[in-house]
Image (cartoon, rainbow, N blue to C red):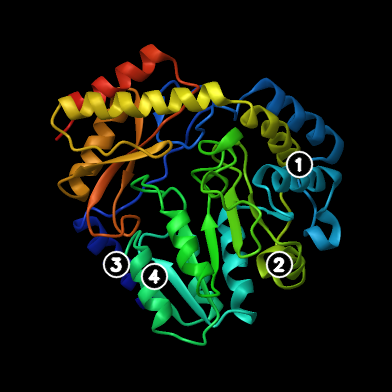
Amino acid sequence: MTGWLDGLERLAETRSKAGLTRQLRPRPADDSVVDLAGNDYLGLSAHPAVVGASASALRAYGLGATGSRLVRGSTPAHLALESGLATWLGSAAALVFSSGYLANLAAVRSLAGVCDLIVSDAYNHASLIDGCKISGTPTVVAPHNSPSAVATILDAHPGKTAVVVTESVFSVDGDLSPLSSLHSVTSSRGALLLVDDAHALGTLGPGGAGGVVAAGLGGLDDVIVTATLSKSLGGAGGVVAGPAAFIRHLVDTGRTFIYDTALPPAVAAGVSAALPIAQAADDRRALLAARGAQVVSRLGAAGFDVTPPAAGVLSVLTPGPEAALTWAADCRDRGVAVGCFRPPSTPDGTSRLRLTLNAGITEPDFARALDVIVETAP
């Protein structure tokens, strides 16, 4: 009767020996660490206007949405958020989900009826990879950030209707996808381009409209954009934006939309309040860029090879998973939270510290955090 539990214990031991055990660490409301691990790039999660709008909706609607969007969960707060996001992204329409993960699953899976080939970047986020798997559509993994490789793959499948799936700013290393070149490849071959703009929305492009708009691809009929609302916008949820016909298709066929309880109205209202603040936050985006340069300079002077970040994400290679764990723990013990990324989160078998920039951190705290990272390095 317990054989399967014994099997789980053996798997846990294997992960532990490889330095791949993960732990939940509750974060108290008064946590005083300098946060270079979260994704609150613009520091909006606790903005008074955002919290106030969320509190008002919480009083009006209660804690949850009480049902899926199609049953009971759709409110004016959701519709206002979708309208605002579509306008910001330059898209004809948008649809909000309860998480960015579910938005990606729906976007990729719902293309199965019209596309018979997926080309997926090797460094794509797990949600995109899972979307490819559950779609049942033949998928070819392309070398990272290589438009020429994508062109070769598409040319090797003549007659196929394909979708090329990528991120704009990649979630681990923080490098930028060559979206303009990718779109030249896809558009010339009749393929679609699906871009996860999670780490670029709010940090790149005019008014923070994201990597797709920055590349001049906003609103094109052959481009679909997904994003999370939990990073620069400081809330939760996800969005898919694109042609109106595709959004209509998602409403009818998107399983993670149809069968999932909706995003709480209080969260939708809070994110709606964050939109205009994020759009006007050029000063915060400039601060992120300056802090990215500061990280590269400080860590570079200490002997680390750090690539200048495209937006708010950068990583530092570590000798292995145990070194990454120890380094992150030592930073935390000295009041600095950093991301610790190990397989399978890292696609190439290496481990990293991931640093995410936050415009809400004071300059003295930020400088101290960089000192701690250097002083605790293995």
What residue sits 39% from the left and 23% below the top? Answer: 290
Give the Cα separation between the discs numbered 1 and 2. 31 Å
Residue 284 in the image, given as x and y percentages of width and height:
52, 24
Q: Which residue is mark 2?
A: 246
Q: Earlier in the sequence, mark 1 or mark 2?
A: 1
Judged from the image, the secondary structure of the residue bearing numbered disc 3 is helix
Q: Which residue of the protein is positioned furthest toward the bottom in this rendering?
A: 159
Q: Earlier in the sequence, mark 4 or mark 2?
A: 4
Give the Cα separation between the discs numbered 2 and 3. 42 Å
Give the Cα separation between the discs numbered 4 and 3. 36 Å
Residue 281 in the image, given as x and y percentages of width and height:
59, 25
Q: Which residue of the protein is positioned furthest toward the top in this rendering?
A: 364
Q: Which residue is mark 3?
A: 11
Q: Is residue 50 visible?
A: yes
Give the Cα separation between the discs numbered 4 and 2. 24 Å
What residue sits 83% from the left and 33% below the top? Answer: 59
Amino acid type, label 3:
Leu
Residue 173 in the image, given as x and y percentages of width and height:
33, 47
